[in-house]
Image: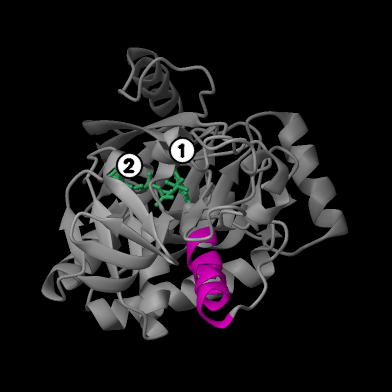
Amino acid sequence: MKIDYLIIGQGISGSFLSYYLNKKGKSFIIIDNNKPNSASKVASGLINPITGRRYVKTWMIETIMPFAVGAYKFLETELNVDLIKKKTIVDFFTTPQMKTAFEDRLANDTSYISKEIDTFKFTPNINFAFDAGTILPSYIVDINSFLDSYKQKLHQNNQIIETNFEESLLSFGTNCIFYKDIKASKIIFCDGITSANNKWFKNLPFSFNKGEALLIKNDSLDINFVYKQGISILPIGNNNFWVGSSYQWNFEDDAPSDAFYNKTILQLQNMLTSNFLVENHLAAIRPANIERRPFVGLHPIEKNVGIFNGMGAKGCSLAPYFAHEFANNLVDKKPLNPLVDVARFTKILSQEIN
Ligand SMILES: Cc1cc2nc3c(=O)[nH]c(=O)nc-3n(C[C@H](O)[C@H](O)[C@H](O)COP(=O)(O)OP(=O)(O)OC[C@H]3O[C@@H](n4cnc5c(N)ncnc54)[C@H](O)[C@@H]3O)c2cc1C
């Protein structure tokens, strides 16, 4: 079988890259091993324009958020499934210092944040001591619906093989790669944390972190809001809420932990006035890196091998925009943003490959 691109991984990254390559008339096959707790399957799907204790604007948000929203809306029509909903984040300050940081930011820059909200309407459901502000617009993407419905389409077109990719079976010809009965011009790794063991890209500065979440049921919370108070509570449909998350840089495995469970239950009991039922506990490892910028592009020495990875905690918004940019680069030779181009690591990637 002869194709243009062999893509490893059907998380958010591999899905969007294949989507835009297809739009450019290129053929591809995805190989995915269906890891039950990949980062994409566990993510809450939030696109949040403001992050951190200092209420900093997310990198390139003015460009990336509208692009992502447009991409998911377009996919809603193409895949005939609901994928994205606009929400307001209500940030209940955990300390007086957080309130001051929010108000300082608001005094200098009003984009994406506001205090024009009647906080009293939340008092029947939420306990809070230090006022609240809002972040808007934000969006929740139903990533699992996207991955599932896109996979169905891939199956209809014979564009996915659900199996494990084995690096030892990959070989190279002149300007092409061979994998089993597949001959492709290029192989692109979109395999999340697995890329850190990959012969070509293992030297990239990956810095993974583990995140956990509880899925709860609650009949009292208004589903038009995302609630933040140390943890975030996101409405995901049918009175179900995603609650999380943690950023653990030291971890032994990717399994749900008792420590997270116990801490989060306490936080929920303090925050909510109503009862909730825990329905699931999830954990996954984010394919993050030290620079907090994606890894995009072809290997500087092995030009038939590429990577689309390093989405960290923001794959839902970064992947659509940079997949589009990478497809333009691969097909039309348009330059990549140097801040995401793996060419910035040419020196370390040129070290001996073995
Ligand atoms: C708890 C948590 C909460 C998060 N919340 C958000 C959020 O609200 N918003 C946001 O934007 N981001 C969030 N993220 C981050 C987001 O999940 C990631 O940025 C994104 O999912 C990365 O997608 P990916 O496709 O690059 O990698 P992955 O999702 O890891 O996908 C890799 C794919 O490759 C496959 N694969 C791996 N190895 C092989 C192999 N050898 N053979 C075949 N297939 C293989 C896997 O099965 C998987 O399908 C969160 C992450 C976590 C853990």
Q: Which mark is residue 167?
A: 2
The residue lying at 33 percent from left, 62 percent from top is 6
The residue lying at 36 percent from left, 69 percent from top is 18
Say what amino acid the circle numbered 1 marks: Lys
**Quadrant position of residue 178:** bottom left
Left or right: 213 in relation to 351: left
> Could you tell me what secondary structure mostly forms the magenta stretch?
helix
* 279, 100: nearer the viewer: 279
Q: Is residue 118 shown above or below 157?
A: above
Q: Earlier in the sequence, mark 1 or mark 2?
A: 2
The residue lying at 65 percent from left, 71 percent from top is 63
Residue 124 seen in the figure: no
Please state the horizontal and vertical placement of residue 265, each as a whole percent of the image. 36, 22
Q: Is residue 20 shown above or below 255?
A: below
Left or right: 255 in relation to 59: left
Residue 353 seen in the figure: yes
Q: Which residues are magenta?
A: 318-332
Q: Are marks 1 and 2 in contact (CB under 8 Å)?
A: yes
Please state the horizontal and vertical placement of residue 349, each as a whole percent of the image. 62, 43
**Whole-Å distance between the Cαs marked 1 and 2?**
8 Å
Instruction: Identify the residue at the far right of this view.
Output: 108
**Quadrant position of residue 132:** top right
Please state the horizontal and vertical placement of residue 103, each as a whole percent of the image. 79, 47
Q: Which mark is residue 199?
A: 1
